[in-house]
Image (spheres, grey):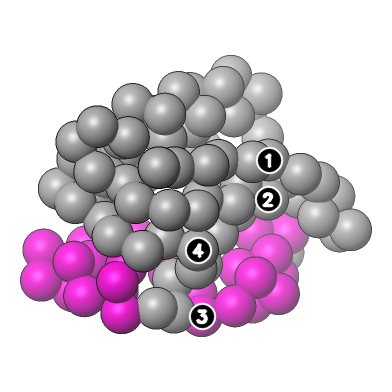
Amino acid sequence: MLTVDVQPHPRGIPLMRVLGDVDLATAPVFQKAVREQLAQRQKFVVDMDGVDFLSSAGLAVLVDLRQQMADQDLKWAVVAARQTVTRPLEITGLLTILPIFDTVPAAVDAVAG
């Protein structure tokens, strides 16, 4: 099961919290939430610290998000401190090309600045 919720951070940056497994069955839920946020044309943070499993389908959503944000020239960040998220990112080489931060405050600072 996957839950994606977007709430405003006190600093005015939308914070998308992703909870559960991001796999082949649930990646479309994540993708839909990302597309809805992209339609707002504003910077935001994706908090993946509640993700228990991240499959290649979930990684594909992040790669697509990276391209879309670059196309719109918008800042964004991913919060990923848990090994369930950082390990797949590391194995695929995405850890070095995505804007990854250990905490929500660090990610918000990077996006807000």
Query: What residue did someone put label 3 on?
Result: 102
Marks 1/3: CA–CA distance: 19 Å
Quadrant that contains the C terminus: bottom right
Quadrant that contains the N terminus: top left
Taking depth in this image into account, of 46 and 70 the one nearest to the observer is 46
Q: Main secondary structure of the magenta part?
A: helix
Marks 2/1: CA–CA distance: 5 Å
Number of other residues with Cα within 10 Å of mark 1, as a class: few under 14, some 14 to 19, many 20 or more? some
Q: Give the range drawn in magenta.
A: 83-112
Q: Write the residue at 64% across / 41% down.
A: 5
Q: In the drawing, what numbered circle is on residue 15?
A: 2
Closer to the chain start, of discs 2 and 1, is 1
Asked if the residue under mark 1 is in contact with the one under mark 2, i.e. CB atoms within 8 Å, the reply is: yes
Across and down, in percent, residue 70 comes to 41, 39
Across and down, in percent, residue 42 comes to 66, 35
Q: Which amino acid does label 3 sit on?
A: Asp
Asked if the residue under mark 2 is in contact with the one under mark 3, i.e. CB atoms within 8 Å, the reply is: no
Marks 2/4: CA–CA distance: 13 Å
Q: Write the residue at 10% across / 71% down.
A: 91
Q: Write the residue at 32% across / 35% down.
A: 26
Q: In the drawing, what numbered circle is on residue 50?
A: 4
Q: Which amino acid does label 2 sit on?
A: Leu
Taking depth in this image into account, of 104 and 5 the one nearest to the observer is 5
Asked if the residue under mark 1 is in contact with the one under mark 4, i.e. CB atoms within 8 Å, the reply is: no
Image side of residue 59 versus residue 47, left or right? left
Query: What residue did someone put label 1 on?
Result: 6
Element assignment for label 2: strand
95 is within the stretch colored magenta: yes
Taking depth in this image into account, of 48 and 20 the one nearest to the observer is 20
